[in-house]
């Protein structure tokens, strides 16, 4: 039985508390938050829970095996580091930290101590993304041509990060997972409409190896909510619409047969193929429950979770490159490999 | 009665022939195309029409007042110039030419000869785009924040131009019209999947004056057809979906009230406002008929058409900047003003 | 403070417990259910709640002012009657009872004892239905022509009632409310595909006074979930799509101007008018919270709730007529007035 | 080469003229219409066509092998009979005639004279309906449970027929084809909102053999255009949405496994199965071209077309029953077999 402490009871924390409370294999021992009213609300619902305003007390609590961190991004590095140093396994909200360097530091700490360090990239645990991962792993799409994601809506401005770190982070972690993304360079553009504020609209191009292009459009000022990803391959294409209540993933049996003959380039390079569309049934288990179970299993079986520190770091690295490019209006930022990263 | 000659009977030419045949105020005298079978097909339908394989003969025909050109982009400059030099008014397919410089040369020729030079930016004449123009001109949207266009589908590869010149040209000419676009710089990214071919996917950011950002996603390899534009302002936002059969333009009475107070930046910068949605009834007259009528009226009344040579040039200039930026993976290309352009 | 006891913890009961627990002005004292596991689950979540397997004990509990009943339809009459006779106010699930006669009996009992008797017609408390009620009350639609509802999906078979009593009951109670329905006669058809089972597909026509026709299509065997209502009037029409996440109610400014002149009947009777579409912003308060508040206010202020016993009875009466007609394959059943019903 | 004469140049006639003009194997020799302006418009487009105001002259024309009739329904019987008596093959608009009896008379005449008599049930020749026919013929749906069609829109009132004969006729001819419909009885309801006018809204239930129920909702007063059919079977279900531009037919691999055990009826009668969805690629050839080709082939090869007189008669018979039932507010009309009809 993994005994869990949760730091942060804002928007997402209560979901983590619920999942670790209901999961077989874990109990929530303690919850911390700076705001007493949040703690009171939690005690109301879970009468047996301990609460504290001090994250340090929670981390020091010897009854706790693992710490789950759902606080603003800027606090992640300090809290994760303390928790690891206290010998606790850690599950931390996305983004893992605010820099590649600090993410690297946490990975080293966890590896040295043989502790589980996992990042809450929830989408990777949805039925939709797992199905897309399966289709791409099975080479169902043929050669990959592009990955295009739109994640926009009105509201829920974040104040400590820009729209790339708030919204595009989801798409980058998804593509890291399903594409086995090997980025080569990044170019991003964006704009802020609030004096002194962070960018609220951003467009991000990732040039990848093997002539694959990826793009994310993130926007906090859109009149409608859109969560739409297209993945194009030589044999098949996928449209993944997360706003759809049930038919989220459509697989289009259509593609492009490129004619390699140099002569034909001038005349007719391309043949289109239009076939059936297939909407696979998806596992509808709540993603956070699947993720919770994996965190528990990783602790109990001393194994590496899918969304480990390296997945967190790879995502942070692209976010960092994107923000840097955006500050320079699209200047190309080349990808630098990381020493020690698994191949 | 304006007597028209049409050069080019490929995909679009027959529509122009139909509209100028049926319009009050014009007749089609002559049609030219290099392919005899195309001409035979036209003669079958319009028994009284003259046809020729020689564009020069058509241009030289003294019975003709105006020449309508629907040939590949690379031929536009020569044909338009010859037609103007022969004293004919000209309506030319988009893009006007393949360079800013050559577009400028045509404008000068037409102005010196006091001939009408008009570019076939058909979308500007649709009920949808005219309604959007009206809403923005009336300041219904408040301060403009962004313009985001997606124009994608499978197939119909162009071989002599890239996807920006083929698809994004529509969006650039629309935004030139509805936004009174004042571009400052362009950054574009894209990729080709055909050996030796042109870019088939492209993303184009236009930084405009007054903190307005515009973006176009153009793609020849998409599994579905999307024609979707969002325009965001401080008071209202528009979603224009050209694939919708009837409810093409939706006006969202929602916006963002930015709080200028520097203190509040940290806390609460933004208030959202969510109100009703309004779907205005649109004029359903065929756009090409409206355009045809304007070309005829411009000749008869010696007035400047809405989509004149300058509109054509402004569009070509952005296309040119975009392709240059795309070749350099997003490098920022600053906008250079054009001598002689109207304010 | 109204002290509430809830009978029945199946699918819907937990929602009622949550709303009466969280509402200002009420507390849940006691919950009963025949199944101990259901009671255990409730105690887990609400540690201070009393539970019992005996509905009679709950009804007899002197600490309780009001009884909320969420049990199968066939048990409603007995439970409501006992609760009223014990001096408790009652909120009962739809349908109120299984016959007009028994509904009448409950109304009489409640009126004699001056107790609140309310029926849980939840949809009447949604933002969408309240907006439609407001539009029709304001005569925005002109003369009403038709009301057409489709309520279909796969699964959730009820075993003690047919599809009319399970699904169409919602539409009948909505139309009773928004149309001030005055039924004249009913014709219904349907079919069962389970040996010995109840009808799983049904079509129900209600002929109303003033040349208004209403129709409901209810189906348990549909591949997709549809919740779509159209209301047509001489001036405007409404499409209400409850599956839409946000744009549930669309008001079409279009209608039919009938020419009364008898001569013109032969030639041109009808003029169409096609105007704008308007999507009003809706109140998004959870319907059950609005309803809960009204039940509490009705008790505290001794007033008649909107969804009183008569609303329950009128709905049951049409259900009864529909099932009778359906058994005779569409035979017309004329509406019989009810003595004592308010005008 | 089949030489065709076309009677009637209203809404549909020009499409027939175009298809028979362009088809290999036929030419249009002559067109008749009572209105000289219609004939002038046709001559404008087809300069070699003969025109006449007299249908009798057209029928008597010895240069004509086949007569195509696109006039109002009330004139069909006389015109078809004359054409057959003149030895011409006939293709007639739907509905074939206005009564079962008169349809029977035409079948006899055609059979005696060994002439092709075909009815223009266009939908049967669409890629969508042919695919549905193929799926049902292959028993892909399992046992058929229901067929539910909605065909509604605003406008285009017919003055000589009610909405059943105008709109539901399409659905009845489609279900006759794809279900091999064996009707047992009909119950219909409807209403007219025009003084002295025909019913403009109608609901039609067809009870079929083998516990299959079919229903059509036809409406001239709807704010939106809907063309949606659901077909439910024990193994799979189909949604056919004819308004969709490309994904018209969706096949849902979901169904209901009914448990026959009488004991289980009380408890758990039904198991749901939810699987993938499949959107087959459809042939996009224009339906009228497929139909035209079949008419020509039937004449040339002396074979019976798919949509022969019997298909026309079966459709008319149900329309007749429906209108009779509607006049009596849903009274059940039992199906009477027809002597001489093929099994």
Image (cartoon, coloured by chain):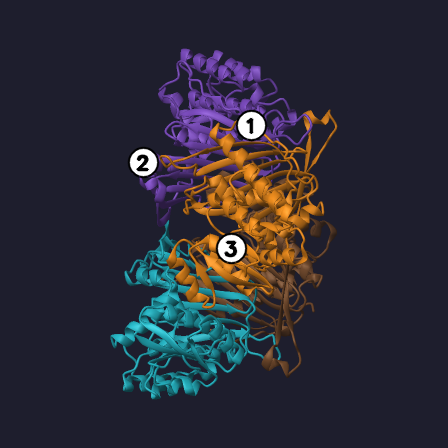
Chain colours: A brown, B cyan, C purple, D orange
Figure quadrant of residue A30: top right
Badge 1 or badge 3: first in the primary sequence: 3
Figure quadrant of residue C70: top right
User: Is label 2 on the same chain as label 3?
Assistant: no
Q: Tell me the CA gap for discs 1 and 3.
A: 45 Å
Can you name the residue that lies furthest to the left here?
B301
The residue pinned by badge 2 equals C139
Q: Tell me the CA gap for discs 1 and 2.
A: 37 Å
Label 2, residues with CA under 10 Å away: few <14, some 14-19, many ≥20: some
**Does C26 sit left or right of A101 as displayed?**
left
Residue A64: percent from the left, percent from the top? 63, 46
Residue A247: percent from the left, percent from the top? 59, 50
- Observer-side mark, 1 or 3, equals 3
* C299 is higher (above) or lower (below) than D279: above
Q: Which residue is drawn at 57% across and 23% down?
A: C328
Mark 1 belongs to chain: D
The residue pinned by badge 3 equals D60
Viewer-proximal residue among D161 and A248: D161
Helix, strand or loop status at disc 3 = helix
**Does A326 sit left or right of B86 as displayed?**
right
Label 3, residues with CA under 10 Å away: few <14, some 14-19, many ≥20: some
Residue D332 image label: 1
Residue B3: percent from the left, percent from the top? 34, 77
Mark 2 belongs to chain: C
Residue B143 image label: none
């Amino acid at each position: 039985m993994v005994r869990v402490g949760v730091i942060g009871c804002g928007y997402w924390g209560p979901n983590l508390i619920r999942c670790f409370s209901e999961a077989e294999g874990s109990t929530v021992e303690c919850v911390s938050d700076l705001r007493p009213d949040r703690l009171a609300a939690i005690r109301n619902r879970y009468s047996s829970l301990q609460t504290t305003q001090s994250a340090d007390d929670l981390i020091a609590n010897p009854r706790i095996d693992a710490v789950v961190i759902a606080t603003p991004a800027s606090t992640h590095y300090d809290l994760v580091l303390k928790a690891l140093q206290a010998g606790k396994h850690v599950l931390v909200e996305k983004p893992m930290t605010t820099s590649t360097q600090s993410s690297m530091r946490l990975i080293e700490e966890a590896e040295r101590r043989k502790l589980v360090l996992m990042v809450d990239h929830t989408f990777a645990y949805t039925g939709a993304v797992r199905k897309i991962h399966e289709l791409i792993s099975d080479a169902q799409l043929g050669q990959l041509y592009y990955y295009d994601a739109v994640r926009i809506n009105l509201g829920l401005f974040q104040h400590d990060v820009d729209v790339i770190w708030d919204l595009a982070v989801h798409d980058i972690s998804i593509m890291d997972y399903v594409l086995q993304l090997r980025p080569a360079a990044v170019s991003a553009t964006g704009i802020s409409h609030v004096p002194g504020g962070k960018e609220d609209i951003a467009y991000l191009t990732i040039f990848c190896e093997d002539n694959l292009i990826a793009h994310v459009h993130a926007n906090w000022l859109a009149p409608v909510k859109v969560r739409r990803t297209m993945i194009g391959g030589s044999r098949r294409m996928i449209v993944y619409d997360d706003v759809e209540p049930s038919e989220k993933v459509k697989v289009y049996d259509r593609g492009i047969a490129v004619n390699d003959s140099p002569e034909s380039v001038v005349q007719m390079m391309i043949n289109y193929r239009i076939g059936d569309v297939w909407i696979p049934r998806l596992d509808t288990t709540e993603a956070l429950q699947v993720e919770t179970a994996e965190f528990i299993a990783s602790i109990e079986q001393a194994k590496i979770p899918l969304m480990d520190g390296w997945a967190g770091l790879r995502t942070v690295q692209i976010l960092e490159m994107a923000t840097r490019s955006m500050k320079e209006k699209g200047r190309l930022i080349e990808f630098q490999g990381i020493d020690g990263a698994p191949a």
